[in-house]
C-alpha cells in the first residue's frame, strides 16, 4: 500500500515506523518539512491543505490517515478537503479521520469544544458512500504512564492526571470512572490492519482496547510502581468552575480534559472491542498498561 499521513507530528511517527516495518510506502503531508523525516528518507509533501494541493498528492495513494491535532485552525475544513481529494482520486478510497478518542458513538458531544470540530467532519463522511472511513477509538493512550524520553507523545501537563515532576496523581472525584487504555503503537498497528481489510466491511467507529480500568486503579498501579507518588482528588464542580473562568488556554484545556475524565465517555462496552478484535485484528497483541510499563523498564532506550 501507499499510505499518506496528514500532519507529521508526534502521533504520526508511530504510524510511519509501523508502515515502514511492514513494507508499505509512506508519504507525509504537512505545512512544513521535518528534519527527522528527511533523515529517514520519507517523501514529504508541503501543502496548504487546499483541495487542489491534496488532490494532486493523494491521486496515486491507496489510503490516507489524518493525525492533525484537535484545536488547530481549520480542523474541519482540512478534513473536508481530504475527503474531496479522495473522491477525486481513482485509488485513494480509504480515509481514517483524526478522531483517536473515546466512545464517540455513544457520547458524540464529548470532549467539550473538540467534539464540535469533529462532528461536522463525521457527518460529511457519513453523508457519502464513495470513500470508506472509520473513526478509530482507542480511549486514552496508555503510553503516558512511562517517561517522556520513551515516547514520541509530548507531555500534556494537567490534561493527564499524572504529574511526573511533583509525583502526584489526581483522581477525578473518587476515580470510579472506567476508562479504556490502548498504546499508541498498538493503535497504529491496528489501523494499518484495518486499511488492509475489505473497506466495504468497515464500521464507522472502530474500538481498540489494551485494557479497561478505573482512574483509581490506575493510581494504585502508579503508586505501587513508585511509592513516592501521592494521590489527591479534584471534584467535577472545581473543574467546571475552572472551565468557566477561562483564565488561560492551558487552564481551559486542562479543565476540558478533567470534565471528560469525570464522564462515562472514555469507556465503551467491551463486547464492541472484542467484536472488532475478531473481525479485523486477529493475531494482533493489544498490550496492557503493565506490559507496556514492563517493556519500558526493561529497555530504557526503547519506544514501546
Image (cartoon, helix red, strand yellow):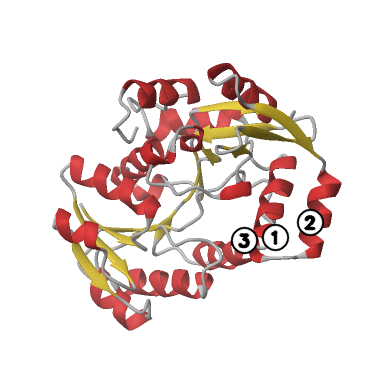
How many residues crowd around disc 3 within 10 Å: few (fewer than 14), some, or many (20 or more)? some
**Of pointers 1 and 3, the one earlier in the residue sequence:** 3
Q: Position of residue 57 (x, y in %)?
A: 24, 72
According to the picture, the residue beneath numbered tag 3 turns out to be: 114
Q: In which quarter of the image is residue 45?
A: bottom left
Position of residue 234 relative to residue 70, above or below, is above
Lower position in the chain sequence, tag 3 or tag 2: 3
- The image position of residue 165, as x and y in percent, is 56, 39
Tell whether label 2 touches label 1 (CB within 8 Å).
yes
Place of residue 137 in the rendered image (x, y in percent of width and height, measured from the top left): 52, 44
Closest to the camera, between mark 1 and mark 3, is 1
- Alpha-carbon neighbours of circle 1 within 10 Å: few (<14), some, or many (≥20)? many
Distance from label 1 to label 2 (Cα)? 7 Å
SS class, disc 2: helix
Q: Position of residue 125 (x, y in %)?
A: 50, 64
Above or below residue 76? Residue 104 is above
- Whole-angstrom CA distance, mark 1 to mark 3, is 12 Å
Q: Mark 1 points at which residue?
A: 252
At mark 1, the secondary structure is helix
- Residue under pointer 2: 242
Q: Which residue does the image show at 38% across and 40% down from the upper left? A: 149
Residue appearing at x 71%, y 53% in the figure: 255
Is residue 5 or residue 51 the one in the foreground? 5
Along the horizontal axis of the image, is 64 left or right of 166?
A: left
Q: Which residue corresponds to the image point at 15% horizontal and 44% vertical from the top-left?
A: 23
* Between discs 1 and 2, the one toward the N terminus: 2
Q: Is mark 3 on a helix, strand or loop?
A: helix
Q: Is residue 138 visible?
A: yes
Q: Nearer the viewer, mark 3 or mark 2?
A: 2
Q: Compared to 218, does 200 lie above or below?
A: below
Amino acid at each position: 500500500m501507499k499510505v499518506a499521513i496528514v500532519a507529521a507530528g508526534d502521533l504520526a511517527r508511530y504510524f510511519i515506523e509501523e508502515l515502514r516495518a511492514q513494507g508499505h510506502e509512506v508519504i507525509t503531508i504537512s505545512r512544513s518539512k521535518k528534519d527527522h523525516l528527511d533523515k529517514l528518507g520519507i517523501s514529504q509533501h508541503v501543502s496548504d491543505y487546499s483541495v487542489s494541493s491534496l488532490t494532486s498528492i493523494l491521486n496515486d495513494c491507496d489510503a490516507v490517515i489524518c493525525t492533525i491535532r484537535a484545536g488547530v485552525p481549520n480542523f474541519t475544513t482540512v478534513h473536508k478537503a481530504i475527503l474531496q481529494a479522495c473522491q477525486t482520486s481513482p485509488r485513494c478510497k480509504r480515509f481514517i479521520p483524526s478522531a483517536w478518542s473515546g466512545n464517540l458513538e455513544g457520547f458524540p458531544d464529548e470532549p467539550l469544544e473538540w467534539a464540535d470540530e469533529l462532528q461536522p467532519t463525521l457527518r460529511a463522511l457519513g453523508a457519502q458512500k464513495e470513500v470508506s472511513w472509520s473513526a478509530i477509538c482507542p480511549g486514552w493512550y496508555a503510553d503516558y504512564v512511562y517517561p517522556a524520553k520513551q515516547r514520541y507523545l509530548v507531555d500534556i501537563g494537567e490534561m493527564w492526571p499524572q504529574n511526573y515532576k511533583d509525583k502526584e496523581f489526581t483522581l477525578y472525584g473518587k476515580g470510579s470512572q472506567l476508562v479504556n487504555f490502548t498504546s499508541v503503537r498498538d493503535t497504529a498497528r491496528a489501523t494499518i490492519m484495518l486499511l488492509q481489510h475489505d473497506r466495504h466491511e468497515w464500521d464507522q467507529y472502530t474500538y481498540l482496547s489494551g485494557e479497561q480500568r478505573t482512574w483509581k486503579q490506575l493510581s494504585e498501579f502508579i503508586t505501587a510502581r513508585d511509592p513516592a507518588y501521592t494521590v489527591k482528588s479534584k471534584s467535577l464542580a472545581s473543574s467546571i468552575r475552572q472551565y468557566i473562568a477561562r483564565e488561560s488556554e492551558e487552564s481551559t484545556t486542562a479543565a476540558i480534559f478533567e470534565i471528560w475524565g469525570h464522564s462515562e465517555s472514555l469507556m465503551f462496552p467491551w463486547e464492541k472491542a472484542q467484536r472488532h478484535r475478531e473481525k479485523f485484528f486477529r493475531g494482533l497483541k493489544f498490550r496492557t498498561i503493565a506490559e507496556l510499563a514492563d517493556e519500558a523498564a526493561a529497555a530504557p532506550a526503547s519506544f514501546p
